[in-house]
């Protein structure tokens, strides 16, 4: 059977890049084997639902260019693909587990459970609802059947818990981590179904994976502790379990703990693919798209955070990643996020884009600055300064002087380059630049150089002063190419402006 994999986020907020990487690895695995990549929204916990989160998830993958074959917003033969729309499916499966002795009703109130926890704490122990304690609790294992039915009929609150067999070794085979054995006595009887008619993640996840014929579950390391329960649920239902692969965590840049939004805020980088405006708190979080990253660069960066092809190559197209990807080459240990490496990837991808391809992104930058410019002129500027860009958002900082005259000048550069008589020398250079009605870059270059040499002027001092007049600092691309693009009339005006500001 060709693999069927799913990415199943919960709409509880913005999509973390760790989740994007999980989706990417699922995509690469599916495409390499001619399989199916599915989007399922797991929204069983309605108390944590956040308005707009589902649309945000879908838009993120549209921007990244990762296309689902089935799922929410796409359709398919295994829908609906949103768990809240599958609500009626789960109850018969919960009841089947009870009938088969794999689950039981539990009527314990939050207050009674809290009392048990406090009693355990007073003895310096941790309370766990499991094989050793379930016989002391209010549930269908300890209450007469007629009492259980009376409580259910009267509308008393209950949950359905999984019933682990006592002292049983549960083998977990992971495609990345190998074999692990967990004894059931270490595990608590997880809640599978709530009296509000909604299943918990554990039951809905297993039922949906079975009904959607999922063959491989590729998910984050944080779900590894749930693997024994999921494997036992498959056994309880008599179903074949999919193969599991648990991905290493994305770590903070210092490697100390899981990468969080707080780390991004503190160190100045996004941890979400798109800008997110939290409808509850009003807080805004930055996104890779709005920070000037290209989606291809984000995909490439994330692919190598935890997976290594075994070569020195670092730049991969999505097609190359599909061909090379394998679960066997995923690391068992966490992968440290590096802002410098993220910048490097984006810089590399910007360089292979033509100025024409980058123009739509740059046009938006100019619009936000209130600048009106022709496409032809902007593309010429892009071609000159593209190699200086790490992000599309760097465009204005690197090129503002092509669109507006400098209003101030770098003090350190002025102190080093502007000497007595510099203003008059720049006026001479200006006349040499204006000599021809049609500007000829090479001819103007030769005239200026010959004049500087003939008069034994300090070439670095004069030319850098001219650059400061045009740019506002001793920076920028080749001087005469810049003059040709800006125009000699504008250069004349900028020379006069700096002379007036400095010498008067």
Image (cartoon, rainbow, N blue to C red):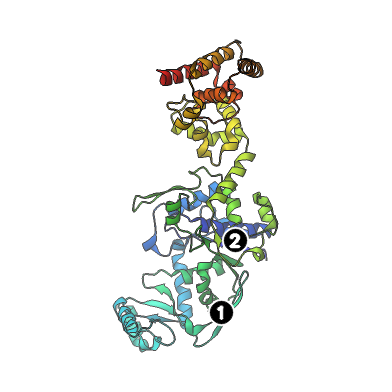
* 10 Å crowding of disc 1: few (<14), some (14-19), many (20+): few
Q: Nearer the viewer, mark 2 or mark 1?
A: 2
User: Which residue is nearer to you in this view: 184 or 76?
Assistant: 184
Name the quarter where the N terminus is drawn.
Answer: bottom right
Horizontal side, residue 319 vs residue 343: left or right: right
Horizontal side, residue 115 vs residue 66: left or right: left
Residue drawn where x is 41% and y is 68% of the image: 198
Assign a secondary structure to mark 2: loop
Residue 79 on image: x %, y %:
53, 60
In the picture of the structure, the residue carrying the numbered disc 2 is 306
Residue 415 on image: x %, y %:
47, 28
Assign a secondary structure to mark 1: helix
Horizontal side, residue 376 vs residue 420: left or right: right
Name the quarter where the C terminus is drawn.
Answer: top left
Horizontal side, residue 473 vs residue 328: left or right: left
User: Which residue is nearer to you in this view: 364 or 467?
Assistant: 467
In the picture of the structure, the residue carrying the numbered disc 1 is 235
In the image, residue 440 above or below residue 106? above
Q: Earlier in the sequence, mark 2 or mark 1?
A: 1
CB of mark 2 within 8 Å of CB of mark 1? no
Using the rendered image of the protein, determine whether residue 423 is visible from the camera's viewpoint.
yes
* 10 Å crowding of disc 2: few (<14), some (14-19), many (20+): some
In the image, residue 279 above or below residue 372? below
User: Which residue is nearer to you in this view: 6 or 252?
Assistant: 252
In the image, residue 341 above or below residue 201? above
Using the rendered image of the protein, determine whether residue 213 is visible from the camera's viewpoint.
no
In the image, residue 156 above or below residue 13? below
């Amino acid at each position: 059977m060709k693999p069927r994999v799913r990415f199943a986020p919960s709409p509880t907020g913005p999509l973390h890049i760790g989740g994007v990487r999980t989706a990417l690895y699922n995509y690469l695995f599916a495409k390499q084997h001619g399989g199916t990549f599915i989007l399922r929204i797991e929204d069983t916990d309605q108390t944590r639902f956040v308005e707009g989160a589902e649309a945000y998830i879908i838009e993120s993958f549209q921007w990244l260019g990762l296309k689902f074959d089935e799922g929410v917003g796409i359709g398919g033969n295994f829908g609906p693909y949103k768990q809240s729309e599958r609500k009626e499916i789960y109850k018969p499966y919960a009841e089947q587990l009870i009938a088969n002795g794999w689950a039981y009703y539990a009527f314990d109130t939050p207050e009674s459970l809290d009392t048990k926890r406090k009693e355990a704490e007073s003895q310096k122990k941790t309370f766990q609802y499991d094989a050793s304690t379930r016989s002391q609790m209010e549930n269908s294992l300890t209450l007469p059947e007629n009492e259980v039915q009376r409580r259910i009929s009267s509308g008393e609150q209950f949950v359905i818990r999984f019933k682990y067999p006592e002292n049983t070794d549960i083998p977990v085979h992971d495609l990345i981590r190998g074999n692990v054995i967990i004894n059931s006595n270490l595990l608590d009887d997880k809640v599978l179904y709530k009296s509000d008619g909604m299943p918990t993640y554990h039951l809905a996840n297993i039922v949906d994976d079975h009904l959607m014929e999922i063959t491989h579950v590729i998910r984050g390391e944080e779900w590894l502790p749930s693997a024994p329960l999921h494997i036992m649920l498959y056994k309880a239902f008599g179903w074949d379990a999919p193969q599991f692969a648990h991905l290493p965590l994305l770590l903070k840049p210092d490697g100390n703990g899981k990468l969080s939004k707080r780390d991004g805020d503190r160190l100045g980088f996004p941890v979400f693919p798109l800008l997110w405006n939290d409808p509850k708190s009003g807080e805004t979080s930055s996104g890779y798209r709005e920070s000037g990253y290209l989606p291809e660069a984000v995909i490439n960066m994330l692919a190598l955070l935890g997976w290594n092809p075994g070569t020195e190559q670092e730049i991969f197209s999505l097609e190359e990643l599909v061909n090379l990807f394998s679960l066997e080459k995923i690391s068992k240990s966490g992968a440290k996020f590096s802002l410098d490496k993220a910048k490097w990837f984006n810089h590399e991808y910007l360089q292979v884009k033509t100025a024409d391809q980058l123009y739509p992104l740059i046009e938006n930058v100019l619009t936000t600055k209130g600048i009106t410019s022709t496409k032809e002129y902007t593309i010429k500027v892009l071609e000159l300064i593209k190699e200086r860009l790490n992000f599309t958002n760097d465009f204005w900082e690197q090129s503002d002087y092509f669109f507006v005259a400098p209003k101030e000048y770098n003090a350190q550069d002025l102190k080093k380059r502007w000497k007595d008589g510099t203003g008059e020398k720049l006026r001479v250079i200006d006349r040499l630049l204006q000599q021809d009605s049609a500007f000829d870059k090479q001819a103007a270059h030769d005239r200026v150089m010959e004049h500087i040499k003939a008069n034994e002027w300090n070439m670095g001092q004069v030319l850098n002063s001219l650059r400061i007049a045009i740019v506002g600092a001793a920076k920028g691309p080749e001087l005469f190419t810049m003059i040709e693009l800006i125009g000699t009339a504008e250069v004349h005006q900028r020379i006069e402006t700096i002379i007036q500001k400095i010498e008067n």
